[in-house]
Amino acid sequence: MRRGRVVAAAFLLPALVLLGALVVHPIGFSVYRSLFDRSGDSFVGAANYQEILTDPAIRTALRNTLVWVVLAPATATALGLVFAVLTERVRWGTAFKLLVFMPMAISMLAAGIIFRLVYEADPDRGVANAVWVGVHDTFAESSAFPKARPGRDSPLTAAGGGSYVTVEPVRAGTPVVLPLVGVAPDALPEGTRPAVAATAEPGRVTGTAWQDFTRGGGGRTNAVDAGESGYAGLRVEAVKDGTVVERTRTRADGTFSLSAKADGAVLRLPAENFREAYAGVDWLGPALVTPAVIGAYVWMWAGFAMVLIGAGLAAVPRELLEAARVDGANEWQVFRRITVPLLAPVLAVVLVTLVINVMKVFDLVFVIAPGSVHDDANVLALQLYRTSFGTDADPGLGSAIAVFLLVLVVPVMVYNIIRMRREGRR
């Protein structure tokens, strides 16, 4: 017995030494260091832990970590379950699983660089915005005059909301001038022609909307000059008592014509004429940066969840599924009442593993989120790094954050150990 214990201790000793050097000692030293100030000379007790609960940056990191724990593991597990179930029914399921699992071969750093480019704000570079802008522009027409505005001493004035109106009501038989500036000549829409001064028509309101700018200088203000271009397709509305009585669009030379209904009305150039061209979504802005980074994480780890759940699904007795179908259950009922309950142990393993992994996420947030929104995308692991090694480093507070993060992870690990032992007894 004694010899057997000595042999066992000899075999365990290297592992225990490594465990003590790489796990126990760092944890013990972190707990010890968290009780001292920035310099490590003065004992401050629980002051660092109190600062964790009062510091706004750390509280933001804690809130974002909670969002990560709630959304990322559940989304990745749900997608893995769907992929595992659906790919069982197709011949090319193996190829699909390979493609979904492939991101696991990429490091977090490389994935962060990839998604930093995917979320690029410029649609010409960022895939996400290229797709988003393409879909938007398919259903919503963009403005041809996003920077147009009235010039000096113009008969137009701003009406709020981005629209412009004539200062005075218009009269039938008297041509109206609607001079605008601010659009580069090369940016005018195709089909634009030189502007033409509108002619008077009895009983009708006519006018011209044009670029009141002559290349090379010269020309008269608020008057159509040779070489100036008309605004083709500009929307013009006649408004009386707040109601649009008639609307039209300008011709290629900038001229337009309205019926006698417009007599005495105010002409309005609605804001849709001047709305800035749609440039997509600010994925890495303060509002969306956390969901965007979570999306990158799910892209990486959905394959991991799919493989584990697929292995569990292969062990599900097919006779139970067939019996349920024979009894009249549809596919949704079979999935919800048979497949998911039988996969519950596997789903718990995947979910708990991802929860532990998510609590330590650092590199994705650090790489994807621009420096200007690090405070908005902050998580506890990133805050630990910034506090311990960033500008104005505070190793004492950083050690307290590390201990706090360990305390958050321990209950999940304990639950996982208890669950594994329970499964082992069955």
Image (cartoon, rainbow, N blue to C red):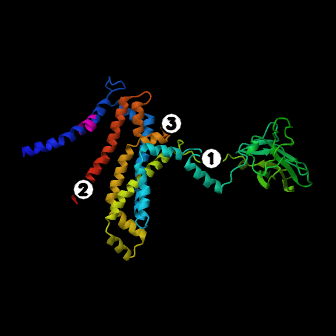
Q: Position of residue 65 (x, y in %)?
A: 42, 43
Q: Secondary structure at mark 3?
A: helix
Residue occupying image coordinates x 36% and y 29%: 395
- Could you tell me if residue 82 is visible in this image? no
Report the amino acid beneath label 3: Gly
Does residue 224 appear to the left or right of 107 in the view shown? right
Q: Position of residue 156 (x, y in %)?
A: 80, 42
Labelled disc at residue 371: 3
Total marks in image = 3
Residue occupying image coordinates x 45% and y 42%: 365
Does residue 369 appear to the left or right of 170 in the view shown? left
Between residues 302 and 198, which one lies in front from this camera angle? Answer: 302
Q: Secondary structure at mark 1?
A: loop
Report the amino acid beneath label 1: Ala
Identify the mark nearer the N-term, 2 or 3: 3
Residue occupying image coordinates x 44% and y 48%: 297
Question: Which portion, as a residue range, is magenta?
Answer: 19-25
According to the image, label 1 marks what residue? 279
Between residues 130 and 25, which one lies in front from this camera angle? Answer: 130
According to the image, label 2 marks what residue? 422
| Front: mark 2 or 3 | 3
Does 392 appear above or below 109?
A: above
